[in-house]
Every structure is written in C-alpha cells, then in structure tokens.
Image: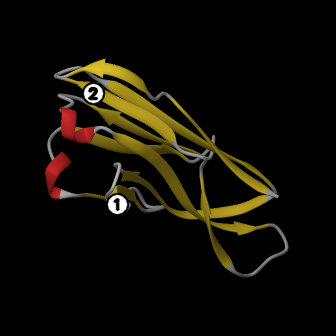
Amino acid sequence: QVQLVESGGGLVQAGGSLRLSCAASGKIFSINAMGWYRQAPGKQRELVALITSGGSTSYTDSVKGRFTISRDNDKNTVYLQMNSLKPEDTAVYYCNAEIRRVGVSLLINYWGQGTQVTVSS
C-alpha cells in the first residue's frame, strides 16, 4: 500500500505564511509528478501547483509569486511554502502524486487526506 500524509495546515492571519508537507510512504518504486490541490466550500477542487520529477514547476495564476512548491526525492516528500496568504486561499489542501509501486507497471494517482488552511482577514 501507498499512503500520502499531509501536515502543516492551520489558522493564520492575512499576510502570514504556512508550509505544507506531504510524505509518501509504502512500496514505492518511483514518483512522477507531485502536486497540491485545494477545495474551498462550494467550489470545485483546483490545481494549485505542480512539480515534475525533474523539478519543473507550474502554478495557478492566483498564487504565482506567493507560493512555492518543492520536493525532496530522497524523502518522497513534496512541500508547499505559502506566503502573503489571503482569505481567498482558505480551503482544504490536498497533495497528489503519480506513483509507480514496486512490482506494478502502472502509474497510479494517490491523494492525501487533506489539511485545512484558514486565513483570517
């Protein structure tokens, strides 16, 4: 089995910072892209940031210049550094990873359980 475990969410005032972490564990052979998504109440889940296995990154426009995604391949962990947070960043944040398990040829999408980020005005 493979698990993604997130940490780092919480309550912060507007203008503050938070750092999310997501560690993948289990019988992992390799990890391709890793990403962070978020879902606010009443809205669809949206992609926030993505990082490839080679380190290329992309961001949704609303977080460019404020959020930074990074990964530590030795630790199978992806991070999201969130600065200059705004109330509209309030959402449940989910990590996602494309993982090839040991002995399995397919790439499978795995999701974390979600972590709440609340930004007060």
Taking depth in this image into account, of 107 and 118 the one nearest to the observer is 118
**Residue 87 picture location, percent across and down:** 20, 33
Residue at position x 34%, y 49% in the image: 40
Mark 2 = which residue? Answer: 119
Taking depth in this image into account, of 66 and 31 the one nearest to the observer is 66
Q: Earlier in the sequence, mark 2 or mark 1?
A: 1
Say left or right for 82 vs 39: left
Say left or right for 87 vs 22: left
In the rendered structure, which amino acid carries the disc numbered 2? Answer: Val
Up/down of 96 relative to 64, above or below? below
In contact (CB < 8 Å): disc 2 and disc 1: no
Q: Residues within 10 Å of mark 1 (few under 14, many from 20)?
A: some
Mark 1 = which residue? Answer: 47
Say left or right for 30 vs 51: right
Up/down of 44 relative to 81, above or below? below
**Residue 116 picture location, percent across and down:** 45, 35
Frontmost of labels 2 and 1 is: 2
Residue at position x 72%, y 51% in the image: 3
* Residue 56 shows up from this direction: no
Q: Secondary structure at mark 1?
A: strand
Residue at the extreme bottom: 105
Would you identify the image quadrant in which residue 75 lies?
A: top right
Residue at position x 50%, y 38% in the image: 115
* Residue 42 shows up from this direction: yes
Would you identify the image quadrant in which residue 60 lies?
A: bottom left
